[in-house]
Image (cartoon, rainbow, N blue to C red):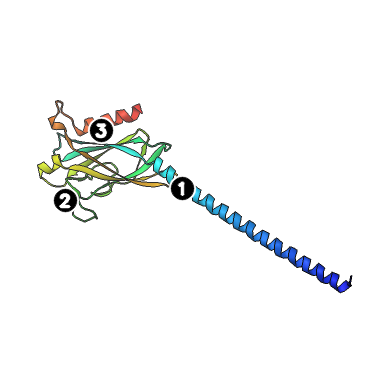
Amino acid sequence: MDAELISAIGSLASVAVAVIAAIVAYYSWRTSQHAANATAVLTEIEKARWHAENRPQFQLEFEGLVMDNRLAACSITLTDSKSLPWVDVVASVRPRVFGRTDTEEDFGPFIWDDTSEHYSDPIDTETFRLYAGGDQTLYMRAASDEEWQRYTYPIRLWLHCTADNGDTWMVPTSRTLVPLQLAESIVTREQIEAQAQTRYEAG
């Protein structure tokens, strides 16, 4: 066979091998990209599932104090946190209509009292930490003198929660005021604080 023909055949074979290798490399890259994308999608789905399953659950208690007619004790308990040992919380008074305003009366019958622990402003608290099963008692005052509003309208809060891994939730909660002056025993602010301290020490 002619030497030039043999050389040409060899060159074509080399080109063919190079093309095949390039095609194989391309499809291998495409496969790895699809696998990476699929893994990313599954990771996001798993994160969303974890976030939904670990949404904090709260119990809200709201009691009027007989010794100070304008004050009420608001107790927030972290009742269910799944795998979360604690969450950081900012409690915000929800307005009667959607959208925040600068008028205190637009936020319902009660706002945060400036003598309360973790007070930031009449609408928002400072950040406080709640452990699973733990509670925090805060104090609110009547935003108006209309007595019927205070005992008819529920207190409505947004609980802005942050976990140690950075995940966040905004949990709505509400509860109607229980006027303690209708109870048999006289309950004061000091008694409620002592009860809260007892529950904390017992936990």
Residue count near mark 1 (Cα–Cα under 10 Å), binned few <14, some 14–19, many ≥20: few
Which of the 4 quarters of the picture holds residue 177? Answer: top left
Give whichever of 2, 179 is nearer the camera: 2
Residue located beneath label 2 in the image: 105
Q: Quadrant of the C terminus?
A: top left
Q: Quadrant of residue 29?
A: bottom right
Tell which circle, 2 or 3, labels the residue nearer the N-terminal end: 2
Residue in view at x 51 percent, y 51 percent: 40
Mark 1–mark 3 distance (CA, rounded to whole Å)? 44 Å
Circles 2 and 3 in contact, beta carbons < 8 Å: no
User: For the residue marked with disc 3, what is the amino acid?
Assistant: Glu
The secondary element bearing badge 1 is classed as helix
From the viewer's perspective, tell me whether residue 45 is left or right of residue 186: right
Looking at the rendered structure, the kind of residue marked 2 is Glu
Number of the front mark, 2 or 3: 2
Which residue is label 3 attached to? 193
Q: Is residue 17 left or right of residue 154?
A: right
Mark 2 vs 1, N-terminal side: 1
The residue positioned farthest toward the front in the image shown: 1
Asked if marks 2 and 1 touch (Cβ < 8 Å), the reply is: no
Mark 2, secondary structure of its residue: helix
Q: Which of the pair 200/2 is nearer the observer?
A: 2
- Which residue matches tag 1? 45
Looking at the rendered structure, which numbered label has been put on residue 192?
none
Label 3, secondary structure: give it: helix
